[in-house]
C-alpha cells in the first residue's frame, strides 16, 4: 500500500482544520464548505510556491481554470507551464455529479489528483471511483488519486480518506 506524501498529508490536515472550523461556526450551506476548502487548499499550494488557479484563490493566483483547482509550476520569465503538481475536483451533491467531476481527473495528467465530496456512504463511493480508475485506458502505473469523502450521518460526521495508486 502506498504511503501519503507531504502534500497529501497537508491536504488532509487542511480538510480536518476546515471541518473543525465548521463544528464551531455551523455553516448552513454546502457553498460555505466549498469556499473554505478551496481557499484553504489554494493557500496551501500558494505557500508551497505553486501558481494556483481556482475559485476563491484569486488573491494569489487566478480564477477557476479547467478544474476546481489546479496547481502549476511556471517559468517566471516566460510564464510557460513546466509541470502540474495537482488537479482537484470538489462535489457536494449527487453520486452522478461526483462521477462526472471525477471523470475530469481521469483525463488529466498531474502528480496529484484530488477528489473531495460528501456522501452518506463514502466507502461505497471510494470503490466506485477506484473502479473507474482501473477501467480507464488512460490510467498509467503510479497515477495517484487522493479521495476525501465527508461521511455524514444524523449523529456523526467525519472525513474518510484513501490514497489509491494505480
Image (spheres, helix red, strand yellow):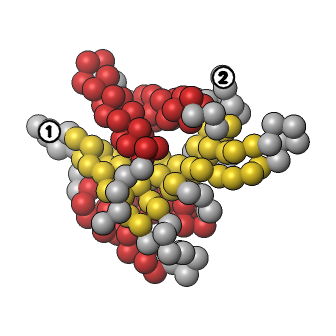
| Residue 15 higher or lower than 111, as above or below | above
Residue at horizontal 62 percent and vertical 62 percent from the top: 109
**Residue 13 visible to the viewer:** yes
Residue 90: give x, y in percent of width and height.
47, 47
Q: Compare marks 2 and 1 and give the one earlier in the sequence.
A: 2
**Residue 35 visible to the viewer:** no
Q: Residues within 10 Å of mark 2 (few under 14, many from 20)?
A: few
Q: Quadrant of the N terminus?
A: bottom left
Q: Residue furthest right?
A: 78
Q: What residue does disc 2 label?
A: 59
Q: Quadrant of the C terminus?
A: bottom left
Q: Nearer the viewer, residue 31 or 135?
A: 135
Q: What residue does disc 1 label?
A: 156
Task: Describe the element under mark 2 as helix, strand or loop.
Answer: loop
| Residue 26 higher or lower than 159, as above or below | above
How much space separates mark 2 and mark 1, taking CA atoms? 35 Å
Residue 77: give x, y in percent of width and height.
87, 37
Amino acid at each position: 500500500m502506498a504511503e501519503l506524501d507531504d502534500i497529501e498529508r497537508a491536504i488532509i490536515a487542511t480538510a480536518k482544520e476546515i471541518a473543525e472550523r465548521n463544528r464551531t461556526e455551523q455553516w448552513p450551506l454546502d457553498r460555505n464548505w466549498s469556499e473554505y476548502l478551496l481557499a484553504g487548499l489554494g493557500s496551501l499550494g500558494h505557500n508551497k510556491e505553486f501558481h494556483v488557479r481556482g475559485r476563491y484563490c484569486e488573491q494569489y493566483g487566478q480564477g477557476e481554470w479547467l478544474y476546481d483547482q489546479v496547481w502549476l509550476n511556471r517559468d517566471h520569465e516566460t510564464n510557460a507551464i513546466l509541470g502540474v503538481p495537482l488537479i482537484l475536483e470538489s462535489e457536494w451533491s449527487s453520486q452522478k455529479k461526483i462521477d462526472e467531476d471525477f471523470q475530469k481527473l481521469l483525463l488529466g495528467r498531474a502528480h496529484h489528483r484530488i477528489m473531495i465530496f460528501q456522501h452518506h456512504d463514502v466507502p461505497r463511493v471510494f470503490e466506485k471511483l477506484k473502479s473507474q480508475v482501473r477501467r480507464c485506458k488512460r490510467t498509467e502505473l503510479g497515477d495517484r488519486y487522493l479521495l476525501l469523502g465527508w461521511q455524514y450521518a444524523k449523529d456523526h460526521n467525519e472525513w474518510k480518506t484513501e490514497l489509491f495508486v494505480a
